[in-house]
Amino acid sequence: MGKKLNSAFLLIITVLTAMALLVLAFVIFFIVKEALPVLETAGLSELLTGSRWMPVDYGTSGGMAFGLFNFIAGSVAVSFLAIVISSVVGLGAAMYLSCAAGERTRAFVYPVIDLLAGIPSVVYGFVGIVVMLPLFLKAGVHTGSCVLAAGILLSAMLLPFLVSSCSDTMLRAKECYMPSAEAMGISKWYAMATIVLPASWRNILFSMILAVGRAMGETMAVMMVIGNANLFPNILGKGETIASVIALEMGTAVVGSAHYHALYMAGLILMIIVFFINMGIMLLRKHLLNRGGAGNA
Amino acid sequence: MKKLLSVLICLILVLSLAACGQSAEGEATDTAASDEFQSSIMFCGSTSLYPIISSLASSFTDEYEKWSDYDASFPEANVSIYVAPGGSGVGASAAIDKTADFGMIARTIKDEEKEALGEGYQEFVVARDALTVSVNASNPICKVKDDLDKETIKKIFAGEIETWNQIDSSLPAEKINVYIRDLSGGAYEVFQKAIMGEAEITSSATQSASMTELATNVANDPWGIGYVGFGAFTKANTDKTVLAAMKVDGVEANEETIISGDYVVQRPVMFVTGDEISESEQAFIDYIFSKKGYDVIVENGYIPAFSA
Amino acid sequence: MLKARLTKMWAYAGMGLVLGIVIFIFIYIFAKGAGSIDLEFLLESPRGAVLGMEGGIFPAIMGSLAFTLTAVVLGGIPAVATAVYIVFICKRSSFENIIRGVLQCIAGIPSIVLGLFAYSFLVRDLAIGRCILASSAALAVMIMPFIEARVEKSLREIPQQMLSSSYALGCSRGYTVFHIALPYVRQEIISALILGGCFAMGATPPLIFTGGVAFSGVPQTLLEPAMALPLHLYLLVAQGTPSLGAAYGTAFVMMAVILISNALATFYGRRRRWK
């Protein structure tokens, strides 16, 4: 292999990267460009705090309105609920994997849990509709669709990520402290509860926040079970998320209309929220890492 | 084993690249031939109409694999008919943007849409559909009332009447749950125009992504009410009665009143285009308006707008 | 000691629940779907007055294959290139941060918005029409950060020793990357591509407005629209009871693909990951 070929290869890599970056940057630019015109019709404060959503002029007395507040609240509520449920279950599993399971069990269980991440979200929605909604219906929730149902579905989708990142953290903390704990004759589970968990809580919290970012953008599964009503989310009530508004209404929106731009704006807001969560975590992690601390790596 | 797999994957990648190349060629010949013959037809839009069209597209392609099978004078090109669901709004804009040959719409066409489609505008009304004001069949209201006037319906959907006992004092004080289609459905607009007028539908109403879903929702909620489409209503009620439709201003929704126009909350189910109809398109349109089409429309619960 | 016992209970319950969920979903779909699966279902077009009630899902299987492969080719190559660039070529950390920022941003875009982008820009503005290519472009953008992150991670895990030895022997950077680094992580790259493909295969939102249709034949070129398994499942569910059997069958096929792909990916990626 000649030198020329080698440098050509490096060049190709660089060009491909540059192209990929340009395309990705263009996607972001395009979304921003399509979102901004809505500000001519509705102010930012109306978009963020208004809760009336009437994006098409049907000649109703109130006229058009572009309040995204309930949708934003819906996205946040569902994600939050999902994280809480997922953390409780996932932390338990992570503790088991890092403390009770041996090398072999882990090598087998990780890929099995990873399967949850691979299941398409329509399948989650489908299982939600045929299995979970009838249960909620029996429990007295009208039609069965509710924010809680969406939260439960979403929590299952987040489990693989939470379990693997939490158990990684705990394994590290365990390696750090367990030998001394064992030397002092403290039981495995007691050490887990009093030493390993407190030592890794910070990284666990990071993982939880990162998972929020992942949860916010989920469309299909949530849309299929949340009921889609423009209401402030209530745990057994219906709600609607940003992603489901876009999926449900983009079809109608006449290109170039305020409705169309408003939906792009909704997407942009979602994107910004997730971006800040991710960036915040990155900065925070760097900051905390510089100060050091056990269990961090 | 590993080697075999990587070879296999490479092969797939190369093949798909080849497919890309081929597709470019295929496209070139396609455009050359398109002056003479259009072998693929694209429908896009209403979730109410797409099951009918896609079912017909399926049986049409089963019957005629190549266009030459349909008519010996047609070239030997594969029959490809695509049906993309999305809602009436999508249908109209797809026909206007020319991203589809036909836009499927389940409402009357708006003037500005008609204008945007230009001189060549044509519409093909396939069926008629009505919006029934349906409640759950187990709701006690079925025993005391079978008729609601427009004003009451309007108040219910606007959220001014919130409990069943406000409609009739003998009913329990349960909350009324309102079910509607999402904004992209043609039904939303039809109902707004026919019943609501200037009033706005309550924001607590649950949106469904299709008429079938709407019907299922009302069928599952003893205190629900919703504008279930006539097609979805008859389909939901085939086995046993799960939904009960209220008369609107004394007019019951049935085939007769819908065709005569006495039942006001109704809409055409149609597809539109702004382009000239090609030979192949005409062939498929003829197929839609045939006996076969008639049967499929009836099977889907709608009232055909033509006689077989 | 109560604390210890509670923690232990929590751990076992959590683990049991997680495994329970996985097993339940798979068994439920497999048990309910098995009845619909036969050769006709796999190899025929959907039919029936309510489409999908009779017939099969062959065009959807082929369509999904086309969407997924195109997306993996379109998204995988730049993803691997970017990962190599970040790890081996990029020298300025400010530039690396920009790349990372853009990738983070893209990873944060909900897939429905990517579908929107593909519709507005590719289908309408560039007028390539509703087609596989448009959807796959959206899918490719979606899976790129996903594949990049995995490849980058495996590249960073290459023993530094190996690379320094190569440099010490006077090999150029290009030679080292191409002959030492990439072959070393080949399996991880394949595993990342497979998982990325799975991710793309299961995604519905980017298809809705772009190249996914309710009915079509088997796609012949990338410039025509096609059916896809997840979209077909969504539409079957929306159609209600008559097509529920076919819905279970479609879900069955998708879950089987996921299971096989994940097994493959684990097999390929296992070498260092669980050490």
Image (tube, rainbow, N blue to C red):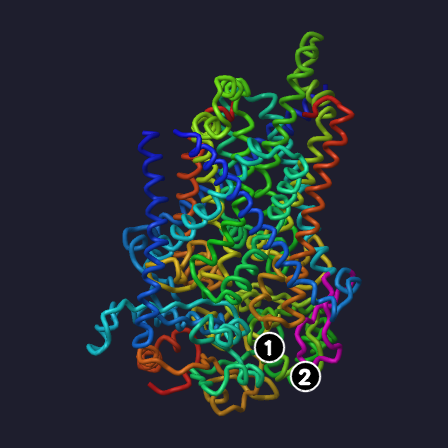
Q: Is A54 one of the magenta-colored residues?
A: yes
Q: Residues within 10 Å of mark 1 (few under 14, many from 20)?
A: few
Coordinates of residue C60 in the picture (x, y in percent): 38, 56
- The answer to which of C110 and B242 lies nearer the viewer is C110
User: Where, quadrant-wise, is the N terminus of chain B in this rendering?
Assistant: top left
* Residue type of the residue flagged with mark 2: Gly
Q: Callout 2: residue from which chain?
A: B
Mark before the other along the chain sequence, 1 or 2? 1
Badge nearest the viewer, 1 or 2: 2
Q: Which residues are magenta?
A: A49-68
Q: Chain of mark 1?
A: B
Above or below for A277 versus A33: above
Label at residue B143: 1
| For residue A207, above or below residue B86 | above
Q: Main secondary structure of the magenta part?
A: loop
Q: Toward the viewer: A74 or B296? A: A74
Residue denoted by label 2: B197
Please tell me how crowded label 2 is: few (under 14), some (14-19), or many (20+) other residues with Cα within 10 Å: some
- Residue occupying the point 39% across, 62% down: C224
Q: Is residue A135 magenta?
A: no
The answer, for residue B292, to whether it is visible in the render is: no
Quarter assignment of residue A241: bottom right
Q: What secondary structure is marked by label 1? A: helix
User: Does the rendering let one see residue A80?
Assistant: yes
Q: Amino acid at mark 1?
A: Lys
Question: Would you place residue B287 above or below residue A213 in this image?
Answer: below
**Residue positioned most to the left:** B72
Residue at (58, 56) in percent of width and height:
A225
Q: Quadrant of the C terminus of chain B?
A: bottom left
Q: Is residue A45 left or right of residue C217?
A: right
- The residue drawn where x is 67% and y is 44% is A212
